[in-house]
Image (cartoon, rainbow, N blue to C red):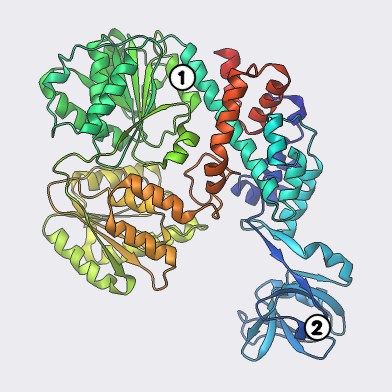
Amino acid sequence: MRPDVLNPLFAEAETLEGVGPKIAKPLEKLGLTRVRDVAYHLPDRFVTRRPVENLDAASVGEQVVVPLTVTEHRASRSARGPYSVMAIDALGNHVSLTYFGRASYTAKKQLPVGAKRWVAGRLDQYGQMLQIVHPDHLSEDSADLLGTLNEPVYSLSDGLTQPKIAGLVAQALERLPELPEWIEPGQFAKMQWPAWADALRLAHKGEHAAARDRLAYDELLANSLALMLVRADNRRRRGQALGGDGSLRGRLDLPFPLTGAQKRSIGEIERDLAQDRPMLRLLQGDVGSGKTVVALEAMLIAVEGGAQAALLAPTEILARQHYDTLRRMLGPTGVEIALLTGRDKGRARESILMGLHDGSIPIVVGTHAIFQDAVTYRNLGLVVIDEQHRFGVSQRLMLASKGKVAPHTLAMTATPIPRSLTLAQYGEMDVSRLDEMPPGRQAIDTVVVSADRTGEIVERLARQLDGGAQAYWVCPMVRELESEDIAAAEARYAALKNRFGDQVVLVHGQLKPEIKDAAMERFASGTAKLLVATTVIEVGVDVPNATLMVIEQAERFGLAQLHQLRGRVGRGAKKSVCVLLRGETLSETGKERLALMRETQDGFRLAEEDLRLRGGGELLGTRQSGDTPFRVADLDQIQRLLPIAHEDARLLMERDGGLTGERGAAARVLLYLFERDWGVQLLRGG
């Protein structure tokens, strides 16, 4: 149960004054559904303004607060043109306060001719005229604007304004309860951090590095503690020791000899499976590094040991793909494998359920359908979880109930993660890395081409398709607006369909699942030759015949994402090419990213470089990248503070009595505050 002291923070955002259905929607878009979310909606940056007596004392481009007198209103001839309110300062300098769209109604009301107003905003120049476009604040009294000299700027969604968010944040901060201190006293004193509530208030007031660090540390500590509780819980559980004699593995039909990295990983898994406590291991491997073969070897160790194995895939298409690949390799062994998805009905489904129940089907591949209540196993010994299932603890608890004892778990990811982030994302697991490519895997030629040569690329694409090959065309990600994202993909799809007809299919995140699946199916089977997509979709399909990948406005993407997309080609025997179409203007970082893509295909190196290029300055949340489980801590803070938080969590668990005692009780509050409460449930429920 959540401690009562946190109830004010977990009240709905609607309990804040001024939040009706109209405001609740845009708040929800930002993930601000409770008072706690609003209190933790930290500013993206701060605007510092200088009070000046007249415009001579200010520079163009500067944020200022200046007294002005309104002289006249000028409406534009066209409805879409600007609405100008002309004003003068104390020295008679002219300036235009410029408004667009509906904002002109505000200007008419608040700026009558002859009135003196204090105006806060950015001073710009348009031609010979000084102007302030959409002033941030207007006031009859200079004292009212004192609070805007160092003003937070929050991320918004349609329907919200800065003053509205700032007002809601102020209300949320008023409701902060007194919470016990969960940071180890020596650590707290050494860092000279403010107390929790003070840190939240300071973080909204200005660039308080210590306050921001303290809040990030809280989140990292909660995560480390929860993962340690999972690990400790796992060690307490009884599993079954599974040892194989190699009789089945020796007969496998492998596409190529095992690499050193594969042999090493299989050895680590084999040692884990031989223990009677459940394995909890992550297999990290670049696209094409041979994770599936390692997973199959692990599943066969389980089968040789008299148990069953299940592979969980995130989508039906990927499940089907895994099933086909595994069935081919399993051919000579005579081991039966079944595919179970939500789509299976009737007799076929019944027969699979029977086979799993009586043990005659030792290996099953499927979507989450394989864990529904109706599915029972004779002896489930190993679960392999593929990609995108950031392995949730709730899933693990569900799996544990499927076996007579808790099954061993192997999670796989094709996203190379920098070592410093592995602890943050997979701190509860042991990690195996596949850092070698199998022999015979061809390098992919990567070329960077200016967007004004798109026509040439379309001609190259035509030659590819005429030669019987397939291709991907990925459209740019427009960070904030998914609608623009889709519009870009739809426009590109229309242009390419015009040229290539029914050979082209479109996939994006807002299509109905059955339409998306049908399009992917047509592409995977080869009836469609060109797949146009946004990055919203996970293009995780293995199409060996696809040899060209075009990525539009490639400079908008992170290195990890470009690398993932590039890995969709180069899966067959033919030479593959990845074309990065770049826009006109490239930042230094953009140039470096594209140069690195040309230079290397090592996903682990690219992941480290990506971290270096983005640096700690770019706040990481789901908004910007979605590649860490944190909302408060940025990359720089994760690298600096996570090792300390991890050690602090370990000491609390091993030396300071865990979650009992005074500090333990405070740590429970922390776990609930950051909704890592499953950690506490594990401790209690086992």
Q: Distance between the residues labelled 1 and 2?
A: 68 Å
Image position, residue 4 (x, y; %):
76, 25
Residue under label 1, please give it. Answer: 398
Q: Nearer the viewer, residue 128 or 646?
A: 646
Along the viewing direction, whichever of 299 and 76 lies nearer the viewer: 299
Q: Nearer the viewer, residue 546 or 270?
A: 270
Characterize the local packing of mark 1: few (<14), some (14-19) or many (20 or more) Cα atoms within 10 angstroms.
Answer: some
Q: In this view, does 684 lie above or below 343?
A: above
Residue at 65 percent across and 19 percent down: it is: 656
Q: In this view, does 26 lie above or below 487?
A: above
Of the residues under marks 1 and 2, which one precedes in the sequence?
A: 2
Q: Is mark 1 on a helix, strand or loop?
A: helix
Q: Name the residue under label 2.
A: 54
Where residue 135 appears, as percent x and y from the top left, is 73, 73
Q: Can residue 20 be seen in this view?
A: yes
Residue 187, image x and y in percent?
67, 34
Query: Where, by quadrant of the figure, is residue 229 drawn?
Result: top right
Q: Which residue is painted at 24% across and 14% down in the image?
A: 303
Mark 2 falls on what kind of element?
loop
Can you tell which mark lies on residue 280? none
Task: Describe residue 579's horizontal placement relative to residue 48 as left or right.
Answer: left
Question: What is the number of callouts on the image?
Answer: 2
Closer to the eye: label 1 or 2? 2
For the N terminus, the quadrant is top right
Which corner quadrant of the image does residue 359 belong to? top left
In the picture, measured across the screen, residue 73 lies left or right of residue 101, that is: right
Q: Residue at x 50, y 53 (%)?
A: 615
Residue at the spot 61% in from the left edge and 18% down from the top edge: 655
Residue 38 position within the rendered picture, expressed as x and y whole percent measured from the top left: 69, 45
Amino acid of disc 2: Asn
Decide: marks 1, 2 in contact (CB < 8 A)? no
